[in-house]
Amino acid sequence: ADEPTGALDLRSAHQVLGLLRALVDDLGQTVVMVTHDPAAAARAHRALVMADGRVVEALERPTAPQLAERLVALGER
């Protein structure tokens, strides 16, 4: 899903992320999501941080503050 919550209000975004989580937890599906939102990405089991089309870091069970810090650091490059 490419930016699945990008154009949604907070409540709708929360619902969409809940549905994606249910696909994983209840049905055993894999979800690949692209987002710039650290809070949304923090719901993942694993997050890949990319820069210039390349993976620069892989985080297991990331937190929103961790991801936000990485995005700020990338912006300073």
Image (cartoon, helix red, strand yellow):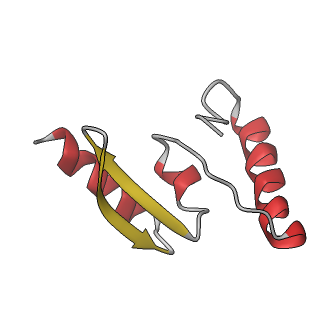
Q: Which of 25 and 7 is in front in this view?
A: 25
Horizontal and vertical percent for residue 43? 61, 62
Is residue 5 rendered to the left or right of residue 61?
right
Is residue 35 rendered to the left or right of residue 2?
left
Which quadrant holds the N terminus? top right
| 43 lies above or below 61 | above
| 45 lies above or below 7 | below
| 34 lies above or below 57 | above
Which quadrant holds the C terminus? top left
Seen at 67% across and 36% down, the residue is 4
Q: Name the residue furthest right.
A: 26
Horizontal and vertical percent for residue 67? 38, 58
| 44 lies above or below 7 | below
Tag count in the figure?
Answer: 0
Q: Name the residue furthest left.
A: 77
Q: Name the residue furthest bottom.
A: 60
Quarter of the image holding residue 49? bottom left
Horizontal and vertical percent for residue 72? 24, 46
Horizontal and vertical percent for residue 23? 83, 60
Seen at 37% across and 67% down, the residue is 58
Seen at 79% across and 55% down, the residue is 18
